Amino acid sequence: MTTLTDRTPSPQVITAFVIVFVVISSIIISLGNYYGQNTNHQVAGAIDTADQIKLTNEYKTAFLSEFDDYLILDTDSDWMNSDILSSTVTIKNNLLALKVPSEFKQIHLNAVVALSEIEKGINVKDLDLVLPNVYKLRDIIANF
């Protein structure tokens, strides 16, 4: 009968195992050092409080300035005009390009949807689609 101590691995197998272990360990340590030095060490999604206040102020200013001349128009104005359509598309695209603070995401979304509906209404020449969304935009701006 053979015992376990009689069946020892050969020195070549042990040497190969040690070499593979050392190579894999050194690769893992090297990658850890590389990524440890080349990262910002900031938690994903974390924003400095001063940056958040700055973002909020910049957003408010940019958001309101987009509508400076747009909502001055009366409901009796010719809303089917191509100039109003181009203004609507420009404002919508400018709003989509803004960085939005989390507290204004719903307001932002509502404004973009209203602008999209106005654009759609102008394209299909449907004043019943345009005017309710103009009122909705005016309400969004007034409560902003």
Image (cartoon, grey):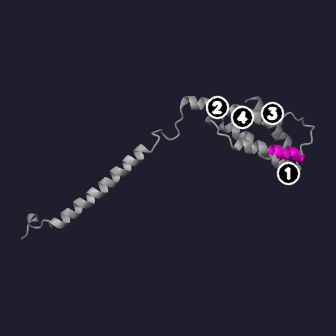
How far apart, in angstroms, are the residues tagged by discs 2 and 1?
A: 34 Å
At label 1, the amino acid type is: Asn
Q: Secondary structure at mark 2?
A: helix
Percent across and percent down for residue 54 are 62, 30
The relative height of residue 12 versus residue 64 in the rendered view (above or below) is: below
Q: Residues within 10 Å of mark 1 (few under 14, many from 20)?
A: some
Quarter holding residue 10: bottom left
Q: In the rendered structure, which disc, 4 or 3, sits on the residue that comes first in sequence?
A: 4
How far apart, in angstroms, are the residues tagged by discs 1 and 3?
A: 23 Å
Q: Which residue is mark 1?
A: 123
Q: Secondary structure at mark 3?
A: loop
How far apart, in angstroms, are the residues tagged by discs 4 and 3?
A: 10 Å
Q: Which residue is mark 3?
A: 68
The relative height of residue 88 versus residue 140 in the rendered view (above or below) is: below
Q: Residues within 10 Å of mark 2 (few under 14, many from 20)?
A: some
Compared across the picture, whether 127 is left or right of 52 comes to right
In this rendering, does residue 140 appear at all? no
Badge nearest the viewer, 1 or 3: 3
The numbered disc on residue 62 is 4
Q: In the rendered structure, which disc, 2 or 4, sits on the residue that comes first in sequence?
A: 2
How far apart, in angstroms, are the residues tagged by discs 3 and 2?
A: 19 Å
Q: In the rendered structure, which disc, 1 or 3, sits on the residue that comes first in sequence?
A: 3
Q: In the rendered structure, which disc, 4 or 1, sits on the residue that comes first in sequence?
A: 4
At label 4, the amino acid type is: Ala
